[in-house]
Amino acid sequence: MSNIKIQQWLIGIFSVLLIVTLMIVATVEVKKTQGHKAEIDIDKVSNQCIICHEKENIAVKQIDAWEESEHAVMGIGCNECHEAEKDDFDAQRCPESDFLIARHPTPKDCAECHEEQVNEFANSKHAHQFWLLKNADRAILENPIATRHGCEECHNIANMWPDGSVGECDVCHAKHSFDMAVARQPETCGECHVGPDHPHIEIYLESKHGNIFKALGNEWDMRYNTTKNEPIPIEAPVCVTCHMDGNEKQPMTHDVSARLATESQAPWSFRTVWDEEGLGSWEVKRERMESICNSCHAPSFVDMYLLTADLVNLQYNEIRRFFVYWTKKLTANGMIDRLKADGKYYSDPVLIGYDETPEVLMYHSWHHEGRRFRHGAEMMGADYTQWHGIWEIQHNMIEMLTWAAEHGDEEAQIWVDSNDPIKFAPYALYDIPGTAWGISAKANTTPYVYKYDDYWDRIKANVETAYNTGFLSEDQWNLWMKRYDNKEHYLGLKYEADVDSTWNFYKDRNDVDTEAFIKQAVNLELPGKSFYEGK
């Protein structure tokens, strides 16, 4: 056979092989686009469950979700999670077979494969039964059916099962896919962390973190693995990034208490002592959180931002002290009459209130506005620290003192009659020279308090006391003193002359605006009479 013939044969063979290869690739791609699923190898019991559910058209979408899960890929089927013993609390016979199945897989079942995660969760505040121990605000003011589909919908993340396990894993890990992308979605946390008393999802979405997520998050693969001490693979944090995921230095954890240094949801802010023997002191917990923050931010920024947030928590305590004083006084003089039934008081004037204005104001200033004030500062949600937080707390204060004055309290009447703006600070203050971000050459220096010559001496004494009682660390005290010793710099006072020209430029523009609205609105008089003549 000639060389030419051989070459022709070779070309023909390779052409056929190329065509066959292209056909195989095309077939695979078509199957992918058609939602082709990988072969799943499960036991006979699980397979029979699937066949029966599909035949009877019962929860078939849950089968679809499972088929897309890592469990299915690993050959973990229905039986591994729903297997039951005769005496199990949730054992039942499947109507279409003789199978004994568990209707409610619990964390104890999950622990057979995920023991570490279940133990971490069980040790966290997520699993703390505080809502069972101190639930008077729900048990008295609310009616039972509202509670079932109200507070319990979220607080059942700490459900206590008859088998002794605690929690509900599928609150975060959706049945039956258990998809990490779903668990990491901020809106998953927002199913519970939402609303007037803990608007964490709203605070997050207001923050720069949340804005980056909204802009770019649809491009991120949220199924990443954080158990290998690798860098955080997404550009900005979601909720679990800070509270659960790992990075180069921190391991992943299902104990959301491991990185929280402050109990800022409680009636008073205090440094956490939750599981100190296992998790360490609040300083250790703060170091864990800072380690995550430092993945994106410079340590100097992290330190100052968290110090400022801690001072907000301390300021909240002084505001609460004011409310406690007044509710106790109004109770002692009989103006507040506590709710009582069957010889038991159900209305604590310094904690929970239902039926009288001062009690309700006290409750909201902790449970709603007080939490927003603190959590906004901790999570970069300025609007929640300000308008949804301190602004509403101050109005609660005005309403309480006005109520007390109207009911005959002389001290409250003196406050109401005063025209001195200093009356809006009837409690000790905390402050820090400058801003959380650094220096402002024309910083807000709140004239009605900054006029006092001993202002910073009072503030220093308060911050030092917080340090001496253990609320602030030595590093935080030193950082605050650095600002104090250089307050002319951080308040921008030494630079005022340098920025006068810039200040005057914008002041002149503001004067033009002011002139315009006075002319076009304030001084405008229409010739047509009002249709209502007051008759």
Image (spheres, grey):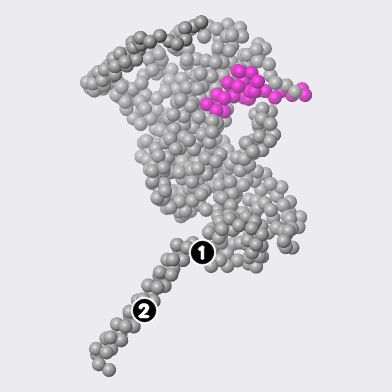
Q: Along the polypeptide, which appears first: circle 2 or circle 1?
A: 2
Image check: 34 left or right of 323? left
Determine whether the residue tagged by mark 1 lies in a helix, strand or loop.
loop
Q: Residue at x 72, y 63 (%)?
A: 97
Q: Residue at x 58, y 21 (%)?
A: 362
Q: Residue at x 35, y 9 (%)?
A: 527
174 and 163: which one is in front?
Answer: 174
Q: Residue at x 36, y 19 (%)?
A: 445
Up/down of 488 relative to 36, above or below: above
Give the x, y percent position of residue 498: 22, 22
Residue, disc 1: 37
Instruction: Inspect the magenta stretch and tell me whether residue 345 lies in it.
Output: yes
Question: The N terminus appears in which quarter of the rendering?
Answer: bottom left
The outermost residue toward the right is 342
Amino acid type for the residue under numbered disc 1:
Lys
Up/down of 290 relative to 440, above or below: below
Instruction: Inspect the magenta stretch and tell me whether residue 348 lies in it.
Output: yes
Image check: 369 left or right of 300? right
Can residue 396 be seen in this snapshot?
yes
Q: Residues within 10 Å of mark 2 (few under 14, many from 20)?
A: few
Residue range highlighted in magenta: 342-369
Image check: 25 left or right of 395? left
Displayed quadrant of residue 503: top left
59 and 160: which one is in front?
Answer: 59
Displayed quadrant of residue 47: bottom right
Amino acid type for the residue under numbered disc 2:
Leu
Can residue 280 be seen in this snapshot?
no
Residue, disc 2: 17
